[in-house]
Image (cartoon, rainbow, N blue to C red):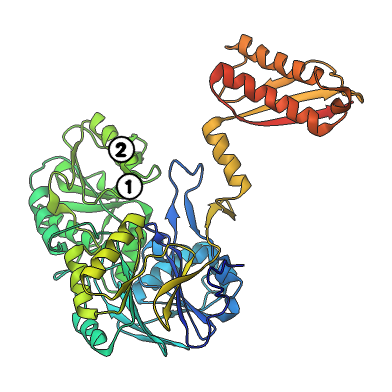
């Protein structure tokens, strides 16, 4: 049950009450899940994933815990996807069976989602409606209008969500790019018209709120790449975000200007290429080569586009850097251009990738060296200010950012004469109307990890134990006792990854002796207790290993009675 700090119950929005409830993407970047409640019904906007790092052992993908809305799915009128990025639609294939609601997306996002659903056998189960650009969706009591914006993927949409309590503009991810190359520029006329109609609240992207200066354009990136590629004679590889179709088109155009042929290296690039061409994008770009075919070209005639700009260990560029790719070899005289930015948290992985490439003799070129080879898909301060000037909302709700981004975005909104700016993180329900906007409740939220074929809460004992094992190691001791709790033979002990019994026999024997002593010192009645026997042995192992190796591993005690 949700906490109710003011006695408010968000199990069902009251009559005339409009609520906003983020379960993912507020207080973090990625993993977006947003809910709007009105008239006892709920509308979901986006359902995305994030990706694991060193702090999450053996976890590649995780997503919001949608239990709150899962328990109310009979009141969930639908899921509307703003665009096709993984952090906005990547969780549909994992969570839809728990929600079983209709899904709405524009053609490009629908193509990407269909491919994902096919992987899990859900392509015929999910009721997916393709909505045209600038289309409308009637999901009573919500009326939704799609407004075209620009971003680093085709067909990004803001949603004008109309209810009897007022209209909310949910921006999704966006920017104002005057020359986006792929798709139309942002529909400022529609935004201005919406502002004149009256907007109760703007729920908006905070990612680049600290970035000053005018917005960059994909057209500028194309020109910069064309100049840069002409400076090198050997093989060239360009690392970029796979979903940036405009960037793919620009790389192809820049390569053609220097008589180079482009090969795609990485499955996600081929998936994006397929979806783009199926929806009319890349129509003037020649078909890309497979990496095995490009291997026959002279060095100065080939350009590889690779996945792995963020140092992802399984991506193509990391396999090339490890000399483990079956068809692509890079070395002295070759160049890797990173047409991307470093996402916070990926610094270590990217630096490790750079170092491996440098050891091969590869020259590294980044946006630090040539700022024009990448432009962000998110709005900086000038663009945010322009959005507020056009829309003029009464309330600003920053999302898609860490705490520092949300607070700064709220500060900027107030400077833009927005009357109220409310900072709310995942699980905090904001009442937008009636009355003053404020956080009125805290509901259950969390994260689910993809662990093989199942979803596991990241805060579960299972995952906490796995994390402890990852960082502190594990140990196992077997203790055999008779009916009175007296030892029958020596305890058997192992600590994989902590102690080598052959190389460190003395230390190994110390642990065995400590376990034996701990068991023998137990009072007679405690020796007859399985609980006391296991705890005595467990503590003996941990204390001894802490003294000899500075480790307190997760310790399992196998108790055998004969």
Image mark for residue 353 = 2
Locate residue 306, reporting x and y percent. Answer: 29, 49
Quadrant of the frame with the C terminus = top right
- Within-10-Å neighbours for mark 1: few <14, some 14–19, many 20+: many
> What's the residue at 25%, 69% (across, down)?
413
Residue 480 falls in which quadrant of the image?
Answer: top right
Q: In the rendered structure, which disc, 2 or 1, sits on the residue that comes first in sequence?
A: 1
Residue 316 falls in which quadrant of the image?
Answer: top left
- Within-10-Å neighbours for mark 2: few <14, some 14–19, many 20+: many
Q: Is residue 295 left or right of residue 319?
A: left
Locate residue 232, reporting x and y percent. Answer: 11, 42
Quadrant of the frame with the N terminus = bottom right
Q: Is residue 184 visible?
A: no
Q: Is residue 388 above or below residue 457?
A: below
Identity of the residue furthest to the front in this view: 6
Q: Secondary structure at mark 1?
A: loop
State the CA–CA distance, disc 2 to disc 1. Answer: 9 Å
For the residue pair 445 and 107, the one nearer the viewer reads as 445
Q: How many marks?
A: 2
């Amino acid at each position: 049950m949700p906490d109710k700090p003011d006695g408010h119950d968000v199990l069902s929005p009251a009559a005339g009450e409009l609520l906003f409830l983020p379960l993912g993407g507020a207080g973090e970047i990625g993993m977006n899940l947003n809910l709007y409640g009105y008239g006892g019904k709920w509308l979901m906007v986006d359902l995305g994933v994030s990706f694991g790092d060193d702090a999450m052992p053996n976890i590649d993908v995780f997503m919001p815990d949608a239990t709150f809305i899962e328990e109310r799915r009979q009141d969930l009128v639908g899921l509307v996807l703003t665009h096709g990025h993984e952090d906005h639609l990547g969780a549909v294939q994992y969570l839809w069976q728990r929600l079983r609601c209709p899904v709405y997306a524009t053609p490009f996002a629908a193509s990407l989602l269909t491919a994902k659903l096919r992987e899990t056998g859900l392509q015929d189960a999910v009721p997916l409606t393709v909505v045209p650009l600038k289309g409308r969706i009637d999901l009573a009591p919500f009326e939704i209008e799609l407004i075209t914006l620009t971003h680093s993927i085709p067909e990004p949409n803001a949603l004008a969500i109309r209810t009897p309590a007022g209209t909310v503009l949910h921006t999704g991810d966006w920017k104002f790019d005057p020359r986006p190359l792929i798709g139309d520029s942002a529909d400022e006329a529609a935004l201005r018209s919406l502002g004149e109609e009256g907007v109760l609240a703007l729920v908006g992207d905070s990612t680049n709120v600290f970035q000053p200066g005018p917005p960059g354009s994909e057209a500028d990136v194309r020109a910069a790449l064309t100049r840069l590629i002409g400076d090198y004679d050997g093989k060239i590889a360009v690392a970029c975000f796979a979903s940036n179709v405009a960037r793919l088109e620009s790389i192809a155009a820049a390569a053609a200007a220097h008589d180079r042929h482009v090969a795609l290296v990485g499955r996600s690039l081929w998936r994006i290429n397929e979806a783009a061409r199926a929806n009319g994008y890349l129509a003037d770009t020649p078909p890309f080569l497979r990496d095995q075919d490009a291997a026959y070209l002279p060095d100065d005639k080939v350009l590889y586009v690779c996945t792995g700009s963020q140092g992802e260990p399984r991506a193509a560029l990391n396999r090339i850097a490890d000399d483990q790719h079956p068809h692509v070899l890079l070395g002295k005289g070759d160049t890797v251009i990173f047409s991307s930015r470093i996402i916070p948290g990926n610094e270590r992985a990217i630096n490790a990738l750079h170092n491996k490439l440098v050891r091969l003799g590869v020259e590294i070129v980044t946006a630090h060296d040539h700022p024009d080879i990448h432009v962000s898909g998110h709005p900086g301060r000038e663009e945010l200010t322009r959005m507020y000037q056009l829309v003029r909302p009464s309330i600003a709700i920053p999302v898609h950012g860490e705490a520092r981004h949300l607070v700064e975005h709220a500060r900027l909104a107030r400077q833009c004469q927005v009357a109220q700016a409310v900072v709310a993180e995942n699980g905090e329900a904001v009442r937008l109307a009636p009355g003053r906007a404020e956080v009125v409740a805290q509901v259950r939220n969390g994260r689910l990890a993809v662990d093989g074929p199942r979803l596991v809460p990241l805060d579960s004992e299972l995952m906490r134990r796995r994390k402890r094992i990852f960082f502190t190691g594990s140990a196992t001791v077997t203790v055999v006792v008779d009916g009175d709790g007296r030892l029958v033979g020596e305890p058997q002990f192992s600590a994989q990854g902590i102690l080598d019994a052959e190389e460190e026999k003395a230390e190994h024997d110390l642990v065995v002796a400590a376990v034996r002593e701990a068991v023998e010192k137990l009072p007679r009645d405690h020796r007859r207790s399985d609980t006391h026997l296991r705890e005595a042995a467990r503590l003996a192992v941990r204390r001894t290993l802490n003294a000899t190796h500075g480790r307190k591993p997760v310790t399992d005690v196998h108790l055998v009675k004969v």
